[in-house]
Image (cartoon, rainbow, N blue to C red):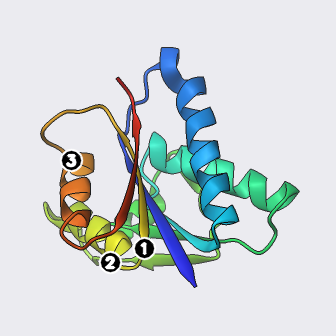
């Protein structure tokens, strides 16, 4: 089964939010039409949760067979007070907790898990040369993952 994951920034500026959502929806639809059925999200604020919102809507309206998987960096994240996180995690068919404790490397470990279990990586990226999205893109390249970049610039 073909799998796809997302990486992206936690803050999507309001002035580009609708554009990013439209472009992300287009990428997801193209992935589904290309045979992708399993979708991983790191469930962080911003792009990750937007990805799950779009997937949940598409599954409800057009693609009932897609599978949504949450990749959680550490167990304590499951208790997040973020209402949007708690609402959207209920749409996940599977939830993977990649580290029992919160530590500096837990987020990179989560991102590696998603990339290693996916053939395609969709990245919503603003071009900065540091951070989790930058790390994940650069982790995916030598693994020869199909990389689809949506520019936030």
Tell me the CA gap for discs 1 and 2: 8 Å
Q: Which residue is more in the foreground, 72 or 57?
A: 57
Tell me the CA gap for discs 3 and 2: 16 Å
Q: State the residue position of label 3.
A: 134
Element on which disc 2 rests: helix
Element on which disc 3 rests: helix
User: Residue 1's image quarter?
Assistant: bottom right
Q: State the residue position of label 2.
A: 116
- Residue 24 on image: x %, y %: 56, 43
Mark 1 or 2: in front is 1
Asked if residue 130 is positioned above or below residue 34 in the image, the reply reads above
- Residue 3 on image: x %, y %: 51, 74
Q: Mark 3 or 1 closer to N-term?
A: 1
- Residue 100 on image: x %, y %: 29, 78
Mark 3 or 1: in front is 1
Residue visible at 65% across and 49% down in the picture: 53
Q: Residues within 10 Å of mark 3 (few under 14, many from 20)?
A: some
Q: State the residue position of label 1.
A: 119
Q: Does 67 sit left or right of 4 as displayed?
A: right
Residue visible at 66% across and 64% down in the picture: 32
Q: Does 103 sit left or right of 93 as displayed?
A: left
């Amino acid at each position: 089964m073909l799998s796809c994951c997302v990486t992206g920034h936690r803050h999507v500026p309001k002035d580009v939010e609708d554009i990013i959502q439209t472009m992300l929806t287009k990428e997801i639809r193209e992935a589904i039409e290309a045979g992708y059925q399993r979708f991983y999200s790191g469930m962080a604020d911003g792009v990750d949760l937007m990805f799950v919102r779009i997937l949940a809507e598409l599954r409800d309206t057009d693609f009932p067979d897609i599978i949504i998987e949450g990749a959680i960096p550490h167990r304590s994240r499951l208790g997040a007070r973020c209402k949007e996180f708690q609402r959207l995690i209920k749409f996940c068919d599977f939830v993977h907790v990649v580290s029992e404790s919160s530590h500096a490397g837990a987020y990179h470990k989560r991102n590696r898990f998603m990339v290693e279990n996916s053939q395609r990586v969709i990245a919503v990226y603003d071009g900065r040369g540091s951070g989790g999205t930058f790390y994940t893109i650069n982790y995916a390249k030598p693994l020869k993952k199909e990389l689809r970049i949506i520019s936030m610039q």
